[in-house]
Image (cartoon, coloured by chain):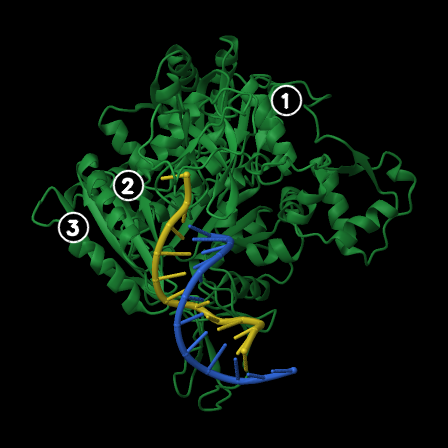
Chain colours: A green, B blue, C yellow
DNA sequence: AGCACGCCGACT
DNA sequence: GTCGGCGTGCTC
């Protein structure tokens, strides 16, 4: 009797392919095995996801598996089910989903022989060496970074923005020594168990009691309330049952400090999966978790796709963070998949945040998630005082009003640090001719170019194009070009003029990549000397600045009134996260928010009542207009060389779908707010329904139509289920 | 996505 | 005469 296997092949087709399992193969065909198969003129690596006894495919069309690449299945049954579920739920080609379930090394037929990554640490006899020449800034900075983080791989060093030459100079000078493995669990520092307050204790007990069954918790804890300690205690109890824990953290959340805290508490038990690892390290850790050798996996988005031996607890830290949603290809939400896996593995899932997403708060309201609140700040620190500054009719200098400047001066006089937040990098977002009104626009996008004064450049923040900064208007040749609006670079300059004796530290993508690393700047801040920090949302995540007692927010209005209905939610979260950077027990913080609309009800709620009432107000609005998370949505996007062809493609889909049912809706094609980006035109269809099944039913039909349509040249299209952006 | 097949323009 | 442009179609 012939044997068949259905294989998920890495190609963008929404189906599996049947192959004959030849008798010449020694092993028995098993679901979860990787196989090498002929596919058209190519040979590809696929994963068996079914072993049917017959097949509808014509005999002459059927091909045979070339060989089995695994002795025993490389993906366990639960992951195969997850892949199939995800392909259906996200309406994404199965083969591409399964591809992402595998570590990169296992996606190829022949495992690439890769030598283990080399790590570098400070040489033991560094004190005997001559100090680095004072002009070798890069080497000094890299050495400091390595000293601070212990051990770094070549790849991590490169990611921090240091060239190979800089590293090689340090190696040749004898300042660094080789190490085989990343810094092992703490050897000297004993693990310190912090004592719990009543709320923390209650949270730990609730989670621990739930171990062994599926349950969902929203751990709502203000910054500094000790969420991590709750996680660590719950993990301890999970380990006590002989089960494993998955901990997800946002992309920028995996600081050396976080990792250290876990490794100190659970020596020899923690695996990590993040961008700093080489491919071979990734498979090693992947296998250690699958076999059960390691009990804790700490990782970013893709870690949610790791097979576990016995998964007993899932924690998603900063669950509101947008980096949990993959923004290309298979657009999955790691947070949502975490909940799905909790249900599959019958274990509790803890979503933690100081600023929970409306999705999770909605689930709390529906009784699906149990709310655990941490209101007290650990160590008795007080919440910062928040003030709204009305800047209507006020003269601003690079966006700074008088009250904020005065408050900054006072803070510095008291020997403290100030943080000024502006979520816009560069010098100025627009360059305009004072004489004829000409605006510097991007050639490829519907956007203005941002002035980068230090580099004498105009840059497009959407496509990366650069031009040299003109000195005269290209249209009327007038010399008077004016900068419209501030960016962090301009803010830095202006603050330097106001406070010439105080160091200004700017933290944004431009300063952290150019100067090599963010860590050096952070270290500088942590010395505690009076200074002013200026920066974008990079400041809002991952780092705490205990000596900052003043947080100034320059311009939050833009986000509150953005085209996307999620604008206020995101701005509110960002605002609270930035505000949370400030102060500690003995140094209470102040937050000043400049606004042109200080009477805005959402802003009022946020400032006077806090995040939760603010979020509840937004949630009520979503309910009123039947927007997510009250309803479910999906977006079909298309981009092409002309707006017409992108819209025409989407129109064909919308026209082929049934109409008249009020239980679901489809609108479009809508051109994106910035229709042209990087030379391509973008449009979208938006599907919405309060019934998930109805949404999926019609989305499925839409995909089938889209697949069959002949596409005009160069058209690309994609499906996004539970999108976090409309465009 | 790849890759092959196929049908029309400027070249040694 | 052919090399090569990318339109179209298929992948068990």
Is residue A92 visible in the rendered image? The answer is: yes
Q: What is the number of the mark on residue A614? A: 2
Q: Residue at x 17, y 43 (%)?
A: A626
**For this view, does A600 lie left or right of residue A5?**
left
Q: Quadrant of the N terminus of chain A?
A: top left
Query: Within 10 Å of the Cα at label 1, are there few (<14), some (14-19), or many (20+) other Cα atoms?
Result: some
Query: Within 10 Å of the Cα at label 2, are there few (<14), some (14-19), or many (20+) other Cα atoms?
Result: many
* Residue A685 horizontal/vertical position (percent): 24, 54
| Letter of the chain that mark 1 sits on in the rendering | A
When the figure is inspected, residue A517 is found, relative to residue A278, above or below; the finding is below
Mark 1 / mark 3, whichever is N-terminal: 1
Query: Which residue is under mark 3?
Result: A657
The mark lying in front, picked from 1 and 2, is 1
Query: Which residue is under mark 1?
Result: A264
| Letter of the chain that mark 2 sits on in the rendering | A
Mark 3 / mark 2, whichever is N-terminal: 2
Q: Quadrant of the C terminus of chain A?
A: bottom left
Mark 3 to mark 2 CA distance (whole Å)? 38 Å
Mark 3 element type = loop
Asked whether disc 1 touches disc 2, contact meaning CB atoms under 8 Å apart, the reply is: no
Nearer the observer, A446 or A378: A446
């Amino acid at each position: 009797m012939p044997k068949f296997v259905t294989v998920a092949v890495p190609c963008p087709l929404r189906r599996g392919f049947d192959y004959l399992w030849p008798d010449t193969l020694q092993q028995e065909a098993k679901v979860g095995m990787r196989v090498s198969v002929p596919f058209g003129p190519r040979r590809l690596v696929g994963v068996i996801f079914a072993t049917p006894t017959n097949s509808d495919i014509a005999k002459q069309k059927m091909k045979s598996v070339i060989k089995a690449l695994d002795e025993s299945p490389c993906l366990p049954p639960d992951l195969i089910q997850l892949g199939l579920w995800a392909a259906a739920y996200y309406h994404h080609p199965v083969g591409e989903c399964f591809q992402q379930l595998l570590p990169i090394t296992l996606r190829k037929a022949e495992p690439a022989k890769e030598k283990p990554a080399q790590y570098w640490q400070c040489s033991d006899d560094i004190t005997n060496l001559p100090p680095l020449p004072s002009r070798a800034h890069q080497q000094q900075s890299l050495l400091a970074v390595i000293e601070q983080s212990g051990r770094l791989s070549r790849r991590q060093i490169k990611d921090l923005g240091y060239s190979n030459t800089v590293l090689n100079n340090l190696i040749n000078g004898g300042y660094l020594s080789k190490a085989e493995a990343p810094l092992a669990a703490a050897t000297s520092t004993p693990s310190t168990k912090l004592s719990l307050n009543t709320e923390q204790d209650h949270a730990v007990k609730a989670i621990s009691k739930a171990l062994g069954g599926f349950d969902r918790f929203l751990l709502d804890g203000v910054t500094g309330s000790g969420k991590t300690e709750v996680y660590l205690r719950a993990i301890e109890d999970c380990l006590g049952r002989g089960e494993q824990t998955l901990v997800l953290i946002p992309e920028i959340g995996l600081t050396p400090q976080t990792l250290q805290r876990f490794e100190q508490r659970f020596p020899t038990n923690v695996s990590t999966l993040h961008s700093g690892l080489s491919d071979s390290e990734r498979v090693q850790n992947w296998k250690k978790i699958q076999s059960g050798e390691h009990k804790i996996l700490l990782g970013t988005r893709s870690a949610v796709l790791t097979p576990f031996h016995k998964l007993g607890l899932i924690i998603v830290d900063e669950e509101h963070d947008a980096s949990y949603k993959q923004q290309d290809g298979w657009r999955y939400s790691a947070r949502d998949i975490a909940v799905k896996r909790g249900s599959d593995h019958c274990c509790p899932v803890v979503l933690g945040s100081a600023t929970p997403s409306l999705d999770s708060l909605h689930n709390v309201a529906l009784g699906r998630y149990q709310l655990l609140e941490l209101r007290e700040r650990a160590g008795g620190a007080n919440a910062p005082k928040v003030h709204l500054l009305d800047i209507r009719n006020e003269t601003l200098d690079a966006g700074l009003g008088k009250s904020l400047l005065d408050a900054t001066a006072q803070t510095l006089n008291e020997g403290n640090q100030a943080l000024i937040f502006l979520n816009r990098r560069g010098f100025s977002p627009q360059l305009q001719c004072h004489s004829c009104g000409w605006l510097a626009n991007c050639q490829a996008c519907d956007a203005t170019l941002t002035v980068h004064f230090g580099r004498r450049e105009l840059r497009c923040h959407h496509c990366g194009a650069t031009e040299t900064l003109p000195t005269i208007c290209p249209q009327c040749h007038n010399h008077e070009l004016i900068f419209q609006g501030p960016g962090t670079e301009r803010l830095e300059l202006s603050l330097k003029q106001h406070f010439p004796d105080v160091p200004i530290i700017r933290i944004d993508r431009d300063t952290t990549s150019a100067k090599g690393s963010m860590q050096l700047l952070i270290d500088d801040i942590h010395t505690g000397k009076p200074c002013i920090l200026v920066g974008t949302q990079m400041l809002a995540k991952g780092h705490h600045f205990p000596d900052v007692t003043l947080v100034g927010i320059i311009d939050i209005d833009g986000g509150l009134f953005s085209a996307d209905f999620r604008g206020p939610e995101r701005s509110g979260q960002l605002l609270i996260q930035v505000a949370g950077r400030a102060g500690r027990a003995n140094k209470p913080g102040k937050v000043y928010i400049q606004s042109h609309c200080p009477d805005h009800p959402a802003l009022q709620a946020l400032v006077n009542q806090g995040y939760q009432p603010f979020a509840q107000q937004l949630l009520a609005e979503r309910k009123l207009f039947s927007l997510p998370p009250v309803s479910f949505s999906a977006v079909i996007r298309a981009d092409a060389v002309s707006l017409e062809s992108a819209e025409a493609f989407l129109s064909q889909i919308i026209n082929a779908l049934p109409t008249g049912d009020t239980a679901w809706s489809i609108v479009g094609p809508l051109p994106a707010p910035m229709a042209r980006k990087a030379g391509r035109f973008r449009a979208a269809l938006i599907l919405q329904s309060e019934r998930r099944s109805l949404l999926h039913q019609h989305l499925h039909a839409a995909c089938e139509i889209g697949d069959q349509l002949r596409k005009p040249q160069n058209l690309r299209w994609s499906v996004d289920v539970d999108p976090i952006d409309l465009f």
